[in-house]
Amino acid sequence: MLKFTLAEDSLPFNYFEELDFSFETLAIKCINKKFPQLSYEESENVFEENSDLFSDKMYELKDSHVINDYCLGEEEIDEGSGTWGYFHFQIEDVDKAKNKLEQEVLDLLEEVIAEIEV
């Protein structure tokens, strides 16, 4: 079981870190699959050149069930710099959560990769 708390503005990327999930590695594999003529390093370069597109697409996961299904609740804390939202998560089966996340991420990555030309 895994329990953690994340700031609202850190989603989804810190969520990925908590699950030891790399969307970058998955994106590079998908690029390499679409463009088999590219080496792994060239696929990494394509990812880097389009990293903003990939990152922007990942923000769609903030409201996704693959993240929200594990959210126990939200808490707002008043701090000197403002009021910040925090989410508390509990994941019983980490492997299952990672598999669900990977499938959702793959779907989003495919949308971005469809637009990429090399």
Image (cartoon, grey):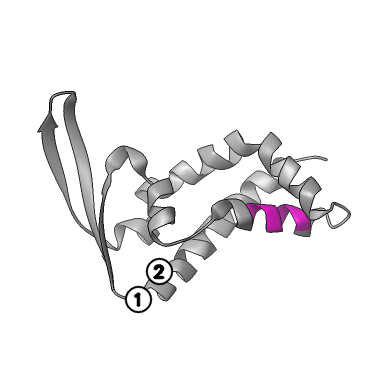
- Determine whether, in the image, residue 15 is placed left or right of residue 72: right
Of 3 and 69, which appears nearest the observer?
3
Mark 2, residue position = 97
Label 2 is placed on what type of residue? Answer: Ala
Q: Magenta: predominant secondary structure element?
A: helix
- Determine whether, in the image, residue 56 is placed left or right of residue 39: left
Query: SS for tag 1?
Result: loop
Mark 1, residue position = 93
Label 1, residues with CA under 10 Å away: few <14, some 14-19, many ≥20: few
Q: Quadrant of residue 40?
A: bottom right
Q: What residue is rendered at 85% in x and 51% in y?
A: 38
Q: Quadrant of residue 4?
A: bottom left
- Give the alpha-carbon distance from disc 1 to disc 2, as whole Å: 6 Å
Residue 9 vs 110, above or below: the answer is above
Q: Is residue 108 magenta?
A: no
Percent across and percent down for residue 79 are 13, 29
Q: Are marks 1 and 2 in contact (CB under 8 Å)?
A: yes
Q: What residue is rendered at 31% in x and 57% in y?
A: 68
Residue 2 vs 49, above or below: the answer is below
Query: SS for tag 2?
Result: helix
Which span of residues is magenta-colored?
Answer: 27-32
Label 1 is placed on what type of residue? Answer: Asp
Percent across and percent down for residue 47 are 68, 43
Of 80 and 26, which appears nearest the observer?
80
Q: What residue is rendered at 59% in x and 42% in y?
A: 54
Of 67 and 94, which appears nearest the observer?
94
Q: Quadrant of residue 97?
A: bottom left
